[in-house]
Image (tube, helix red, strand yellow):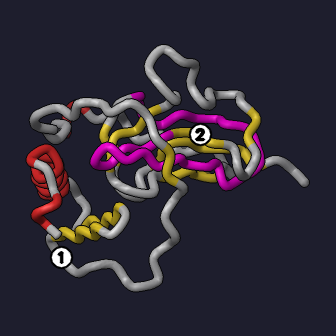
Amino acid sequence: MTDSLSDSDVEQVVRLVETLDGSSFDYLELQIGELKVTIGKGEPPSSGSAPAAPVTTRAPQVLPAAIAPTPLDAVAPVVAPPAGSVEITAPTMGIFYAQSEPGKPPFVTVGALVEEDTTVALVEVMKTFHAVSAGVRGTVVEVCVQDAQLVEFGQVMYRVEPALR
């Protein structure tokens, strides 16, 4: 299978390995078509993983040559999330995009009303874009990441105040 990977594909896998190595996570499992890559520093996840998010396409973006970890003194102070809010988390490690393409308005902003199936972001991994749905009906109360920022699996991207049914 590796003979079908381009130099660019191999380079992006190397970047993922380097990024994982500098992160607090132990593993990354990625499947694109028939290609399945699992990299890790510890035990792989249990077999009861959540299903993959739907995939969409977007013009390819160039990843930075190296993604340096954020120094601890540059991290924003921890603020308690709004009481009763629901977190929308990254389905995979990758680059977070708040809009469908550069120059377009963001999918959602603070105060936006969302439904369970509302697309709130895209996460890019190896030139494949995963649409992230809200998964909850309510109002966006916090955007936790910046556009084009690297996100890790499970990282909070948005907080939503659920609507009363």
Q: Residue at x 26, y 79 (%)?
A: 44
Q: Residue at x 49, y 31 (%)?
A: 98
Q: Is mark 1 on a helix, strand or loop?
A: loop
Q: Residue 110: x and y, percent?
A: 64, 28
Residue 120's disc number: 2
Observer-nearest residue: 140 or 91?
91
Q: Give the range drawn in magenta.
A: 122-147
Measured along the vertical axis of the image, is residue 42 above or below residue 141? below
Q: For the stretch drawn in magenta, what is the main secondary structure?
A: strand
The N terminus, quarter of image:
bottom left
Q: Is mark 2 on a helix, strand or loop?
A: strand
What's under tag 1, amino acid-wise? Gly
Q: Few, some or many C-alpha atoms within 10 Å of disc 2 (few <14, some 14-19, many ≥20)?
A: many
What's under tag 2, amino acid-wise? Val
Observer-nearest residue: 161 or 50?
50
Q: Name the residue tied to disc 1.
A: 42
Say left or right for 160 vs 28: right
For residue 154, what is the image quadrant?
A: bottom left
Report the residue that reaches farthest toward the bottom: 47
For residue 27, what is the image quadrant?
A: bottom left
